[in-house]
Image (cartoon, helix red, strand yellow):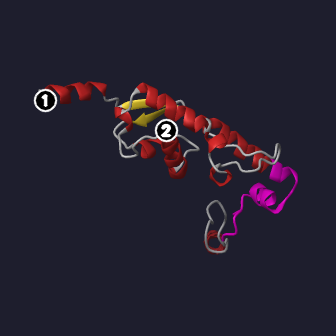
């Protein structure tokens, strides 16, 4: 009899769980699987699991459809239930409200923020326009991809002069 029960459990197991237009790995524990949704990190996933009173060690593929829907609703209403410091869009510059942005909307919001900074010509906006580091990193020795280096210029000039002398 126990062997038949184990086989029945295998049939209920979902290897791929679809949530928020994202395929989640059913073999991972719930908080770790939720992290695959863009805009949901470990902290947000743990808070959402706590809202739904689920065991965080259970595999997401073993959850019933009702529990998965509850989890999805908890993520949708995360901004209403969670503290202000846990949302990813605290005090929106346009509306002044707290939001938690997910998926494609997150990309759009970030792009709009960068364009707004460029438009008002703040320091970060100018750095974005020039393609330089924005968050205070050093630029002398790091992040030199795409630029000409002084050493390479000197070598190129020396080679060009040698070729010109050989031709004469």
Q: Name the residue carrying label 1.
A: 3
Local secondary structure at mark 1: helix
Q: In this picture, is 102 found above or below 21?
A: below
- Residue at the front extreme, as displayed: 53
Residue at horizontal 13 percent and vertical 29 percent from the top: 3
Residue at horizontal 67 percent and vertical 71 percent from the top: 139
Q: For marks 1 and 2, give the CA distance.
A: 31 Å
**Residue 123 in magenta?**
yes
119 relative position to 145: left or right: right
Q: Which of 131 and 23 is in front in this view?
A: 23
Local secondary structure at mark 2: loop
Q: Which of 26 and 138 is in front in this view?
A: 26
Residue at horizontal 57 percent and vertical 38 percent from the top: 75
Residue at horizontal 66 percent and vertical 55 percent from the top: 85
Q: In which quarter of the image is residue 40?
A: top right
Q: Quadrant of residue 111?
A: top right
Quadrant position of the C terminus in the picture: bottom right
Disc ID at residue 52: 2
Q: Which of marks 1 and 2 is nearer the N terminus?
A: 1
Few, some or many C-alpha atoms within 10 Å of disc 1 (few <14, some 14-19, many ≥20)? few
Q: In this picture, is 7 found above or below 81?
A: above
Q: Which of 34 and 50 is in front in this view?
A: 50
The answer to whether mark 1 and mark 2 are in CB contact below 8 A is no
Residue 111 in view of the camera: yes
- Residue at the right extreme, as displayed: 120
- Which one is in front in this view, the residue at disc 1 or the one at disc 2? 2
Residue 101 in view of the camera: no
**Residue 146 in magenta?**
no
Residue 140 location in percent, x, y? 66, 74
Q: Which portion, as a residue range, is magenta?
A: 116-137
Q: In this picture, is 10 found above or below 145?
A: above
Residue 108 location in percent, x, y? 70, 39
């Amino acid at each position: 009899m126990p062997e038949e029960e184990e086989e029945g459990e295998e049939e209920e197991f979902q290897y791929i769980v679809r949530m928020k237009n994202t395929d989640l790995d059913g073999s991972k524990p719930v908080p770790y699987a939720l992290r695959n949704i863009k805009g949901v990190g470990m902290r947000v996933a743990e808070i959402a699991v706590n809202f739904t009173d689920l065991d965080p060690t259970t595999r997401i593929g073993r959850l019933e459809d009702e529990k998965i829907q509850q989890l999805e609703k908890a993520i949708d209403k995360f901004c209403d239930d969670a503290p202000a410091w846990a949302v990813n869009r605290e005090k929106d510059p346009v509306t002044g409200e707290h939001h938690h942005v997910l998926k494609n909307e997150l990309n759009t919001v970030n792009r709009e923020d960068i364009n707004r900074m460029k438009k008002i010509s703040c320091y970060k906006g100018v750095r974005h326009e020039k393609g330089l580091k924005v968050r205070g990193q050093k630029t002398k020795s790091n992040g030199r991809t795409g630029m000409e280096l002084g050493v390479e210029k000197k070598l190129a000039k020396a080679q060009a002069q040698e070729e010109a002398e050989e031709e004469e």
